[in-house]
Amino acid sequence: MKNIAVAFTGPSNSGKTTLIVELSKILQDNGYKVVIVKHDPKDKAMFDKEGKDSYKFSQTGADVAVVSPNKTTLLKQTTSSIENIVEMFGEFDYLLVEGLKTLPLPRIAIFRGNINEDYLEVTDILAIDDTIDKTNISKKYSCLDLNNYNQIIEWINKNGKKLRK
């Protein structure tokens, strides 16, 4: 197992989710196990529908696991550290994290249209498309082609954080 972790950051609608989905598909098509962690800073994500049993269970304040033949959904009433999450998933090849700017992981910032400097202090490399004028980017930042998934995977393989031996 590779156990390589990398994080993605950038403004809303910059293409983070789309990029992670495409990378995940490619990596899985090549036989790798991928784990994705999504940060939900505003606690907006909904995992069940009102009226369903699992929703009723989670509304009690208890931690709830919904187990079906093809998946397990865990509704935990407290936040988890990245270490807890990694432990829950067991063995994997790639951990792709969307958000969580405070995590000490190599980080790719995604930008389209313009560069939001608020993200640069936690960024290792930029992934941009042709809507960004490269001449306006500081020489201290290297750039990846947002639409070249193989180039991005290469960078991850070279620069991603190895979580386990």
Image: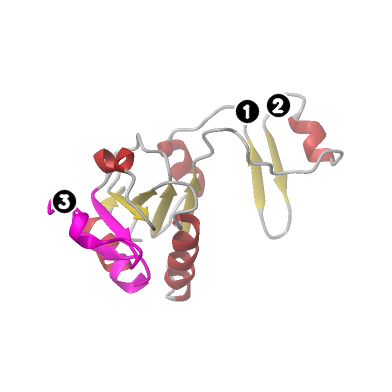
Residue that label 2 marks: 62
Label 2 near label 1: C-beta < 8 Å?
A: yes
Residue that label 1 marks: 77
Image position of 97 with respect to 92: above or below: above
| Three-letter code for the amino acid on which mark 1 is drawn | Gln
Residue at disc 2, secondary structure:
loop
Q: Which numbered disc, 3 or 1, marks the residue that appears first in the sequence?
A: 1
Q: Which numbered disc, 1 or 2, marks the residue that appears first in the sequence?
A: 2
Residue 136, image x, y percentages: 20, 55
Residue that label 3 marks: 138
Residue toward you, 11 or 162: 11
In the image, the segment drawn in magenta is: 124-152
Residue at disc 1, secondary structure:
loop
Q: Residues within 10 Å of mark 1 (few under 14, many from 20)?
A: few
Residue 42, image x, y percentages: 56, 33
* Residue 33 appears in the picture as rendered: no
Check the image and name the residue furthest to the left: 139
- Report if residue 28 lies within the magenta region: no
